[in-house]
Image (spheres, rainbow, N blue to C red):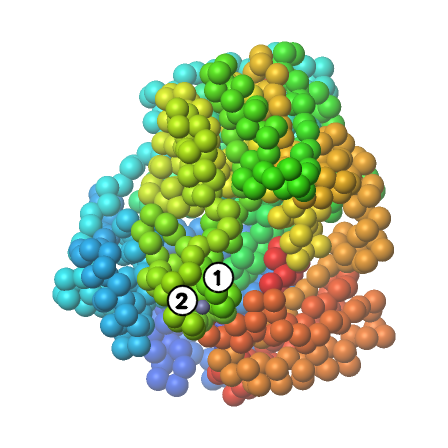
Amino acid sequence: MSIASVIINKSARALDRFFDYLIPENLEGKIQIGTTVSVPFGKGNQITEAYVVGFPQSAQVENLKEIIDILDPVLLFDEKQFALIEFMKRRYFSTYLAALKTVVPYGLGLSAKRVSDKVLKGSTLAVSNAEAFDALEAARDKAPVQARIIELLMQNEFLANADIQMILGCTAASIKSLEKKGIIEPYDIEIFRNPVDYNHIEKTTPLSPTKAQQAAINRITETINAFKVFLLHGVTGSGKTEVFLQCIDTVLELGKTAIVLVPEISLTPQMIQRFAGRFGSRIAVLHSHLSMGERNDEYKRIRSGEARVVIGVRSAVFAPVENLGLIVMDEEHENSYKSQNAPAYHAREIAAVRAKQNNIPLVLASATPSVESYYKALSGKYELITLKKRAKEEANLPNVSVVDMRLELMDGNRSLFSRQLLEEIQVNLNEKHQTILFLNRRGFSTFISCRSCGYVVKCPRCNIAMTYHKNKDFLTCHYCGYTQRSLTTCPDCNSQYIKHFGTGTQKVEEELKTLFPEAKILRMDMDTVSAKNSHQQILEQFEKDKIDILIGTQMVTKGLDFENVTLVGVLAADMMLNLDDYRANEKTFDLITQVCGRAGRGVHAGRAIIQSYAPENSVLSLAKAQNYEAFYEEEIQLRKGLVYPPYCDLLAVMFSSYNDAAATNCAKRMAERIKKDLIGTVPIEILGPSPCSFYKINNKYRKRILIKCKLNDTIMNVLSSCVSEHYKTKESQFVNVSVETNPVHIL
Ligand code: ADP
Ligand code: ZN
Ligand code: ZN
């Protein structure tokens, strides 16, 4: 009898290996890599789902149990996908199962059949805000899961039950019992079957390319049958998208397919329309706001070959297309390409593996490439293609000025806006041009604090200042979602002077309304963009209703292409420069470039005003001059001097536990073990263990070891065996250990 190796569908770290089973005669020849089977597992021989990954020749036959049956004749993954799973397991220190569930899109395989099609069952609050708070407080200790559900529904108008269960890892029973108590009620969420209405999209034809665009198209299409990574560095508005569109034309003519990755925030209706206009119903769109039904539909269209161009966010890099011919990654420097959940993969690395597997080009595009990618381009690992000018003849890069906010303060201007910015806004109002104002973060430091004693309202679980939401008058922790009533007296000193502080987008909106009562003002941030499609609605409204001023967070910086926007203001440019992160300069440069790129895309000249308390900072002046090359030269020297990527990889080994001492001890021991095994063998620097910046989150204490190294097999082996050995010990029941490769935020 022959033998099959399987991965068991159980997420325990201790079970993260292959298990061998005999193939019974009646199934001989019907089982392949990727087949879903049922097997007897564990002491009680519980019937368990498992996935076939190989057929070992020389395994021990004695004592092997037999596979029971085939559960799904459709293969869950093929050999290329399995190679990707193995790559992810090693590079991102994940389990096989977690990698499998990431590679094989959610909704395929067995679970696909369980998804109902017409409406999505959801829930919404059945009581007033005040009553919800009472229920929340009552449930907090006795029924914490129910409390979390109430919190979620206070933050969202409604949610699909499946999403609630997924977010909280809870069962339908918790939702049902809240329903019985009358606190929440069922809410049918209508499914928008098709994310794009292909009937109402105007067909477009290829534009006649500029010389620079033509050169780029030629280089990429010449290489269409070989693996190669291109870095397309083009200023905002240089027509990178047109380059993708025309390369994809070639790919489609060859009978092949393409994947186009865009960051979450730039997957705007405008972007989708440009692709739909060119390729019609041959496109499929994958983003995180699709309902399960919609996602399934798109997967079906991809699998059947109807959809040949997949446009999507990070996870679309796994799209199950056949006969892949090109992968494009727009705004390749964006953080949203890095997953924050295990396996914390980077879509750029996955895209490179898939491009290599299929012998095809990968095109990375950006106006402000990541320092890592530009380094590779200069060292010849990637091929650099540059677009220096805007594609439309009349469109010029905006005129950028940096305003010194210290002088404003000295002159007695305490408002959020410099005099220059106010004047320019007035000019735009007079001329009926549109303005975009940008603030880095939602509710940035809108925390509540006492002006008498300095008390700050913090999350009891995370020890982080809670954010004040004015509309609904409550406080939320942006790390764990803990929600509570706002306060009117200080719990520490009983003073009445407890107020909210800071410059959130809401505050900017209020101040603007007072200053320009006649202006039409719109706000776009995580609070106003929560219900489905509302991102699109806000943008449509901005265009159709000729809104004068759009205020927003990160969401307003990308991809928007409105001809009538001639003024862009950056309210607090320093916020980003001061982030506790080695990429702070890069992020600031990128952000300013992108924001300024929104202005002057039509016939009218654009202006951008950057407000700063440190205008002499060289990152700001280089961003003002739009000089990426000079910025890169400065930044790469810093990275080299301090040994940061691209001169090394960073590995964060995280320890978390309800017991502070347990986390510390475990971290100390592992640091010793890593030092013993690796120092002297490979160039490596081991920092810590030390407490994370956010030391306590959700009541768990967090410690970390930071490793600087060039990630190679030796290091991967040592670390992954450290982790798997940890999960064989009793300690693993109360200390969680994980490793993240090149984390975006080192928190
Ligand atoms: P990027 O992706 O580099 O920011 P876009 O592709 O969005 O640039 O192009 C910016 C603008 O220039 C768009 O309005 C686009 O329609 C226009 N455009 C691009 N290429 C051409 C061309 N060859 N001729 C005329 N207009 C063009
Ligand atoms: Zn006080
Ligand atoms: Zn919290």
For the point 80% across and 68% down, the residue is 684
- In the rendered image, which quarter is residue 140 located in? bottom left
- Residue that badge 2 annotates: 495
Amino acid of disc 1: Arg
For the point 77% across and 81% down, the residue is 676
Q: With 375 as the anchor, is 325 left or right in this view? A: left
Q: In the rendering, at what x and y percent does residue 405 appear?
A: 65, 40
Q: With 556 as the anchor, is 518 left or right in this view? A: left
Q: Give above or below for 104 relative to 505.
A: below
Q: Residues within 10 Å of mark 1 (few under 14, many from 20)?
A: some
For the point 50% across and 14% down, the residue is 431
Residue 464 has which mark? none
- Residue that badge 1 annotates: 451
Q: In the rendering, at what x and y percent does residue 159 appear?
A: 29, 52
Task: Determine whether the beta carbon of the residue marked 2 sits less than 8 angstroms from the nearest atom of ligand 2.
Answer: yes
Total marks in image: 2
Q: In the rendering, at what x and y percent does residue 453 appear?
A: 49, 68
Query: Marks 1 and 2, how far apart in space?
Result: 9 Å
For the point 51% across and 50% down, the residue is 502
* Secondary structure of the residue carrying numbered label 1: loop
Q: Give above or below for 64 relative to 386.
A: below
Marks 1 and 2 in Cβ contact (< 8 Å): yes
* Secondary structure of the residue carrying numbered label 2: loop
Amino acid of disc 2: Ser
Query: 738 or 513, which lies in front?
Result: 513
